[in-house]
Amino acid sequence: MPELPEVESVRRGLAEWTTGALITAAEVIDHRILGTTSARRIDPGLAADFTDRIVGERITGAERRGKFMWLTVGGESGLLVHLGMSGQMRVHPSHAEVHRHTRAVFRLERGEDSTAEAAGSNGPERYDLRFIDQRIFGHLSVQPLALAHGRLVPASAIHIAPDPLEDAFDLEAVVDALARKRTPLKAALLDQTVVSGIGNIYADEALFRAGVHPLAIASRTRRSRLVAVVESAASVMGDALAVGGTSFDALYVNVNGESGYFDRALLAYGRAGQECVRCGTEIAKLTVGGRGSHFCPTCQRMPRYR
DNA sequence: CCATGTCCCTGCAAGC
DNA sequence: TGCTTGCAGGGACATG
């Protein structure tokens, strides 16, 4: 399940493989990956419009805010890529066998100018960029860029808060936003308008490391504890990024198809019934905000509110 | 405005 | 053995 560290690993690969490349062709194999949930119903014009907008454009960079990632194309727009829970962006030789869950294919061309057929030139390098998504929770779209929190981001991502790895990240602002939430802290951490990039795995890990119960009400939690939770989220995601991210169920791989190793470092997520590494208590699991939440009942005490 | 609920989608695992 | 059911999850949108 790609969260910030996994998306950043993919972004780095995309930056390396696609910057400066020309998009010479694009094919949408499954139109459901286009647009948002309402738009993805049935709109035959969408796929044609999508490909028309990017074919012939040159990719100038790969950027990310939280779990939203985009390739800058033609200077003024972005090819937004959200991996959802099972999306992958893979770089393949054009002739490579097409994987079963491939939903879109972009043909890229990079390197020498096609006019330069001079001495010893092999011509431009050609390869595929493929969007693969088993569960179709991910999506692609071409968006105008708009200013939000000091950066140009795709229009549909302007409501997203900066993530902990950005210059614009403001710990005090995040804590202020959390303090206004009357919801369980776990749910507030997953709210991408408060802080972006945190998903279910790292929310559980951050709460465990900070020793805070997932059901603690954000607005009733001491600021010092909110700070600890947010700092834990930032550090645990940084640690995960350093080893290429988490591949809990093999749905996440980078552009080269490689998995990350952080699943071995998870202390709470997916460990229900196992012993807490700190105190030996069985890790418990409950549902918060519709998401499975793993925690240690001893290390993460539930406050008593009056 | 804010909080909560529903839906989208597929593959796997558990249960009968 | 083979079916059905439940579960996993991010985010858009609807509802209270």
Image (spheres, coloured by chain):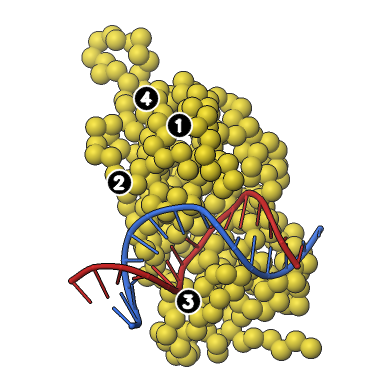
Chain colours: A yellow, B blue, C red
Residue A89: percent from left, percent from top: 40, 44
Decide if residue A173 is on the left or right side of residue A135: right
Tell me the tag on residue A19.
1
Q: Nearer the viewer, mark 3 or mark 1?
A: 3
Above or below, A269 against A6 in this view is below
Kindly report the distance in space between the C-alpha atoms of the residues bearing marks 2 and 1.
27 Å
Mark count: 4
Residue A125: percent from left, percent from top: 31, 25
Q: What residue sits right under mark 3 in the picture?
A: A268
Asked if both marks, 3 and 2, belong to the same chain, the answer given is: yes
Asked if both marks, 2 and 1, belong to the same chain, the answer given is: yes
Q: Nearer the viewer, residue A231 or A103?
A: A103
Kindly report the distance in space between the C-alpha atoms of the residues bearing marks 1 and 4.
11 Å
Crowd band around label 4 with a 10 angstrom C-alpha radius: few (<14), some (14–19), many (20+) = many
Disc 4 element: strand
Q: Is residue A198 visible?
A: yes
Asked if both marks, 3 and 1, belong to the same chain, the answer given is: yes
Mark nearer the N terminus (3 vs 1)? 1
Decide if residue A163 is on the left or right side of residue A248: right
Tell me the tag on residue A100.
2
Crowd band around label 1 with a 10 angstrom C-alpha radius: few (<14), some (14–19), many (20+) = some
Mark nearer the N terminus (3 vs 2)? 2
Disc 2, disc 1: CB below 8 Å? Answer: no
For disc 3, the chain is: A
